[in-house]
Image (cartoon, rainbow, N blue to C red):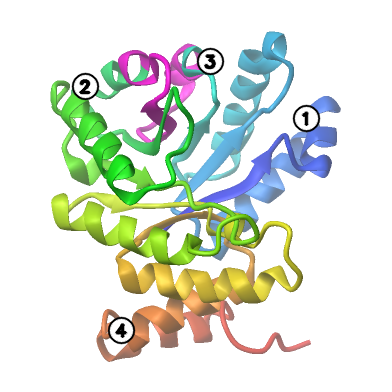
């Protein structure tokens, strides 16, 4: 599972405060802890007022890169912000994100030509997030075809089918797994990602729904996730699901995670 660590985001109150105070040690500590917990990428999202976003995102990138070698996932809803800070990354990482909304593909895909950067692709457009599987597949096709013009192969793309809240759509999980399967059938080497915790929004005992949804999603073919790698429930579910599906030879990764203290009881 490719894990995009989500804990450095200005929408989180304690992170917002750390950004405002330029608390380097707090941000660095979050980056290191996510790396130690198994993050493949560290997402950095400023979520500040537009006039401060470039400056803040540049600062976050510098702090995280000084703290860990884990590649960045540069995150902003404004493609021109990502374009402006792209040069400050010290190694290829991930762009978060493109979609068929506005000119995101046209601004960001050229940055990925001739290198190994990866990208998150959201299955939405100027009309919003579609509710049907086929439209999400169609948007995926458009993004993959645009990416190909810059030499970007499907294995560098992480498609996010935009899982909706179960509290507002009863068939959310069924639709999400259908979307994952349809996308992977069309492009076997593409990655499918998502912020799976969105599914439990507005419901009690969210952790129970989140970890169960993660197991269903992995079984359907999701191999990437925007999540908190320090969430032991979710990490345990990931290791257990891969082992139970026969994707962890001799349960080596599961056993290694136990020995490393990533799963199982925490001894005090």
Q: Quadrant location of residue 209?
A: bottom right
Residue 109, image x, y percentages:
29, 21
Q: Nearer the viewer, residue 240 or 29?
A: 240
Query: For mark 1, what is the residue?
Result: 19
Q: Nearer the viewer, mark 3 or mark 1?
A: 3
Residue 268, image x, y percentages:
79, 87
Quadrant housing the N terminus:
bottom left
Which residue is found at the position 76% from the left and 41% from the top?
A: 25
Whichever of labels 3 and 4 marks the residue nearer the N terminus, that label is: 3
Which residue is found at the position 17% from the left and 53% from the top?
A: 189
Query: For mark 3, what is the residue?
Result: 81
Label 3 sits on a secondary structure element that is helix
Q: Nearer the viewer, residue 5 or 28?
A: 5
User: Is residue 141 highlighted in magenta?
Assistant: no
Q: Nearer the viewer, mark 3 or mark 4?
A: 4
Label 1 sits on a secondary structure element that is helix
Query: For mark 2, what is the residue?
Result: 113
Residue 157, image x, y percentages:
28, 41
Whichever of labels 3 and 1 marks the residue nearer the N terminus, that label is: 1
Left or right: 264 as drawn, with respect to 160: right
Q: Quadrant location of residue 170?
A: bottom right
Left or right: 233 as drawn, with respect to 114: right
Q: Residues within 10 Å of mark 1 (few under 14, many from 20)?
A: many
Label 4 sits on a secondary structure element that is loop
């Amino acid at each position: 599972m490719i894990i995009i660590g989500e804990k450095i985001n200005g929408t989180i109150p304690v992170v917002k405060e750390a950004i405002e105070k330029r608390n380097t040690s707090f941000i660095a500590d979050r980056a290191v802890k996510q790396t130690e917990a198994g993050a493949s990428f560290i997402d950095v999202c400023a979520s500040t007022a537009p006039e401060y976003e470039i400056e803040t995102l540049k600062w976050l990138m510098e702090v995280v890169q000084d703290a860990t070698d884990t590649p960045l996932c540069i995150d902003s809803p404004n493609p021109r912000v990502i374009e402006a800070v792209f040069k400050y990354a010290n190694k290829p990482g991930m762009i978060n994100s493109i979609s068929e909304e506005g000119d995101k593909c046209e601004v960001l895909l050229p940055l990925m030509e001739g290198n190994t950067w990866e990208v998150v692709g959201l299955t939405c457009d100027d009309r919003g997030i579609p509710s049907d599987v086929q439209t999400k597949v169609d948007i995926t096709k458009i993004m993959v075809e645009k990416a190909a013009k810059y030499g970007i192969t499907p294995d560098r793309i992480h498609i996010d089918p935009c899982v909706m809240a179960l509290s507002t759509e009863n068939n959310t999980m069924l639709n999400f797994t259908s979307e994952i399967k349809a996308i992977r059938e069309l492009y076997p080497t593409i990655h499918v990602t998502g912020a799976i915790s969105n599914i439990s929004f507005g419901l009690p005992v969210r952790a129970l729904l989140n970890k169960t949804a993660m197991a269903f999603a992995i079984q359907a073919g999701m191999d990437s996730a925007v999540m908190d790698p320090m969430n032991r429930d979710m990490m345990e579910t990931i290791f257990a699901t891969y082992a139970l599906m026969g994707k962890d030879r001799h349960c080596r990764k599961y056993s290694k995670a136990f020995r490393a203290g990533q799963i199982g009881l925490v001894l005090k």
